Amino acid sequence: MLKYWKENKKSLLCLIIGLLAILVSSFCGSLIQTAGYSVSVSDLRDASNEGTMSKVVVSETGEETTEEIEIEGLVVSGLLFKPNSATADSPHPGVVLTHGYLNNRELQLPFAIELARRGFVVLAIDREGHGNYENSGSTGAMMATNGLYDSAKYLYNLDYVDKDRIGISGHSMGGFTTAMVLMQDASVGIVSAGLMQGWSTFMGAGSDVDVGFLKADDDEFFFTGVDASGEPTISREFLHSTTAANFVGLTYEEGGEINVQNKAYYVNGQVVERTLGTAIDEPFRVIYEENEIHPLNHWSIPSTGNLVDFFYTAFGTPEGYGVLDLSNQVWWLKEAFALIGLLAIFFLIFPLVSLALTIPAFKSLKTRKVKFALALLPSGEGRENAPSPEAYAYQDVEVTEEELKKEEKPLKHPLDWVFYFLPALACTFFSGFVIQSFVNEWGDRWFPNTQLYPQDTTNWVALWSVACGVFAIVMVLLFYFVKLGINKWQYRTNPQEAPKVDNPLATAKISGTNFLKTLVLAFGIVIVLYLIVFINWSIFTVDFRIWTFTIKVFNVPEMVPTAMRYLLFFAMFYVLSGIANQTYRTSTLPEWASIAINAFFNVFGIFLVIMIQYGTFKSTGVLWQGDMALGYIVLFPIIPILIIATIISRLLYKKTGNIWLGSLINAILFTMITVSGTAASFSYVMG
């Protein structure tokens, strides 16, 4: 054991550091989201309960009778935040939160954390077709509304929840679901307040229900309308629209001016004063508007404060709790610890691989066959004097960083720099400027949703990825052959003096046996990472994330078979990308600079079109590409993914001398991350 420690001290220390980072960040994250363990957090799966409601029914003759209505609650997938002080003797107000299209319950955690630490019972749920709530196949994931109302009923049946103070709130398509439930519940009366995040249509509610809109100043999807003169208004003009005026009950004259006050509470069309933490006794309407974009509604300090303000004003301060200022927020600190854990998960790949390569079964992955002259040293001394091909043999030589460094060529001439950067520029601009076509034309045409490939956006992302990978390898090979041609012409009189041009496909050379071993090792590494994620979740109930980029737990029987079907497409991209990455090795630049350049060009094209889209949006209020309101949002996480994948690809190449291990780990891991984090419009096929 001591010998093993001495031989692998660096890798073992890195493994310990990574695991400690996960442990400490998860403990701190758990401490924050439970408000110092004064709130219990439970992962509910297929939880149900039953109860009754006494309903006064008035007949046509005016006679009143009391009717008992059965209330059946169901939470298919939810995170329940229960303050320890909430009991049957002291019930607290309850709030159900749900996410938008393509998201999951964890995207509402900022709201859940801030409400729970203020004494509210909170339930953050997955909607049908998202997260851990499988689609029944009856409707597409975008318009699936199941989950919210059943979860509100579940809260209603809990004895530690105040039945007269139950609220709901959802983001984007979850806002649509909120509006639907408010209308549906009008004749029942379970829900007392509803806040629609990033959704602009209100369809009605009970006469005593508080309702609000939470919106971005510039929203990519909603909040367009007309002013009092009938002229069109864009999102940033919503407070001057007839829709806003009608919502708050403000009267206006045709052709006049409409000025709904931001964050003002309207009762019967009049602004009323209120004190933070104190409920308004009459049903109110309010519109919160912040200088942000649609996907930031559920990941911003201002909007989180607005949601807290809404439920403070609807329900008052829960018993036993003091009023916390709206700026008093800690969720972002929990997210910071989640980011540390996320980075630690990726960091673990390197010591795990290093230690795995010491196992006898995988040791051969650190070697490759090297051609050398017989009777000469394997290092190649005097190799140029070998008399004939028959004087060469092949030998398995261990891959070392020193040997790989010898293969790196300097960039001596201006043309070398042109050949270094030109294909990278072509690839990065291609990857960015073809996205629109894949989203709106080629994706549905060439890769439509089916039972086997059920995810709404994964299909076009996979197809676009393959196209980018193919384009990259075509560019690399094109410039390789151009360089060969130039050398052949330049040294046509003395061909023996022509410098060697390395074949870019050589980095993919591997024996069949070693390929199978590499595949097994890649799967093994990813399985170990997810075991850590699942064990960590069972202990702390925290995930690893930054905004929409997350490694999360999932329903294994449904997700894994689906991910394996998508894996073929993403593997094509990561293998081709891995080959392209290794062509950008030069002794002129240090390794960190080469990695940084690779990472930059892998994401710059995508980043550029997103910046043009949102630069135009924030300056004019209108999107540069209106049909890409969703498409670019889907790709927000792809930027950190490609940067991390570049680092993994380059560093693992140095351990094996070929592109396969890094490429396959990237393919398996990021396919699993992608598939487990989005929506499906069909039920999953298991197997």
Image: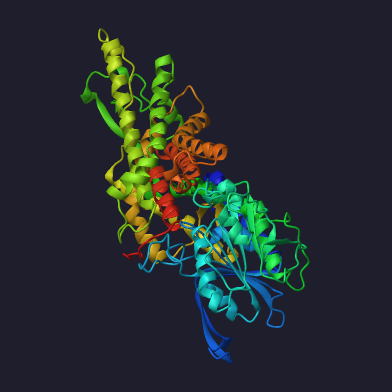
Q: Which quadrant of the view contains residue 383? A: top left
Give me the residue at 44% from left, 56% from top: 678
- Front-most of 544 and 122? 122
For residue 80, above or below residue 379:
below
Q: Which quadrant of the view contains residue 42? A: bottom right
Please identify the quadrant where the C terminus is shown: bottom left
From this viewpoint, is residue 263 visible?
yes
Task: Report the colour scheme.
Answer: rainbow
Query: How far from the left and from the top, in percent, is residue 348?
Result: 52, 49
Give me the residue at 63% from left, 82% from top: 159
Q: In this view, does 684 lie to the left or right of 153?
A: left
Residue at the top extreme? 493
Query: How far from the left and from the top, in percent, is residue 609?
Result: 46, 36
From this viewpoint, is residue 2 visible?
no
Q: Count up the numbered dots.
A: 0
For residue 371, above or below residue 158:
above
Give me the residue at 42% from left, 30% from top: 404
- Front-most of 391 and 593? 593
For residue 210, above or below residue 420:
below
Q: In this view, does 109 lie to the left or right of 435?
A: right
- Front-most of 225 and 275? 225
- Front-most of 649 and 458? 458
Query: How far from the left and from the top, in percent, is residue 674?
Result: 43, 52
Query: How far from the left and from the top, in percent, is residue 685?
Result: 32, 65
For residue 171, above or below residue 82:
above
